[in-house]
Image: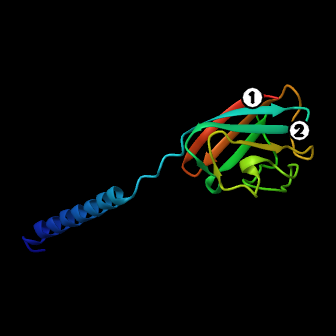
């Protein structure tokens, strides 16, 4: 091997590392940060006799319901069938939710509006008086609300 070959190889290797580092840094810096979830406050009430769960939007951002999902748990166990949002008839729920959860409503949930749904007796676990109900309102970017109440 010639005397000048080793330093040239080292320079080329350092140049390649520099180019890759700059490309990686450029990609990371140019990737847009995800938006935080909407900020809003809600109130939860649940009726163990009727199986009705009611959520009232108390204030904050309007919630785009096309970007929202609900996760409902009873006494720490997730319901077997989770509700789609919005819906009219869904497996595990009585037909005809009210307010923003109803398919006939606009896809926005504003302060002052109340949404209700009724868990059907075919959904497990069944909602009974005294049960702890947890409702999480989620978007792709995070949790909008995490509410707990007693039926």
Front residue of 149/112: it is: 112
Residue at image x 19%, y 65%?
15
Residue at image x 82%, y 56%?
88
Residue at image x 74%, y 28%?
149
Secondary structure beneath dot 1 equals strand
Where on the picture, by quarter, is residue 77? top right
Q: Give the number of the disc on residue 126.
A: 2
Seen in the image, is 30 located left or right of residue 84?
left
Question: Where does the C terminus fall, quadrant-wise?
Answer: top right
Instruction: Locate residue 67, reporting x and y percent.
Output: 61, 55
Read off the residue under disc 1: 149
Instruction: Locate residue 145, reporting x and y percent.
Output: 62, 38
Instruction: Locate residue 105, reporting x and y percent.
Output: 72, 55
Where on the picture, by quarter, is residue 23? bottom left
Mark 1 crowdedness (10 Å alpha carbons): few <14, some 14-19, many ≥20 = some
Front residue of 52/82: it is: 52
């Amino acid at each position: 091997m010639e005397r000048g070959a080793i330093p040239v190889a080292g320079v080329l290797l350092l140049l390649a590392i520099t180019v890759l580092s700059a490309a990686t840094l450029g990609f990371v810096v140019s990737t847009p940060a995800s938006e935080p979830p909407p900020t809003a406050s809600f109130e939860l009430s649940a009726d163990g006799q009727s199986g009705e769960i009611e959520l009232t939007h108390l204030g904050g951002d309007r919630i785009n319901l096309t970007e929202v999902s609900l996760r409902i748990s009873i006494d720490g166990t997730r319901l077997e069938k989770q509700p789609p949002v919005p819906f009219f008839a869904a497996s595990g729920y009585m037909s005809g939710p009210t307010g923003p959860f109803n398919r006939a409503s606009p896809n926005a949930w504003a302060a002052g509006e109340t949404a209700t749904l009724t868990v059907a007796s075919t959904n497990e676990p069944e909602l009974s008086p005294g049960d702890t109900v947890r409702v999480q309102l989620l978007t792709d970017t995070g949790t909008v609300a995490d509410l707990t109440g007693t039926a």
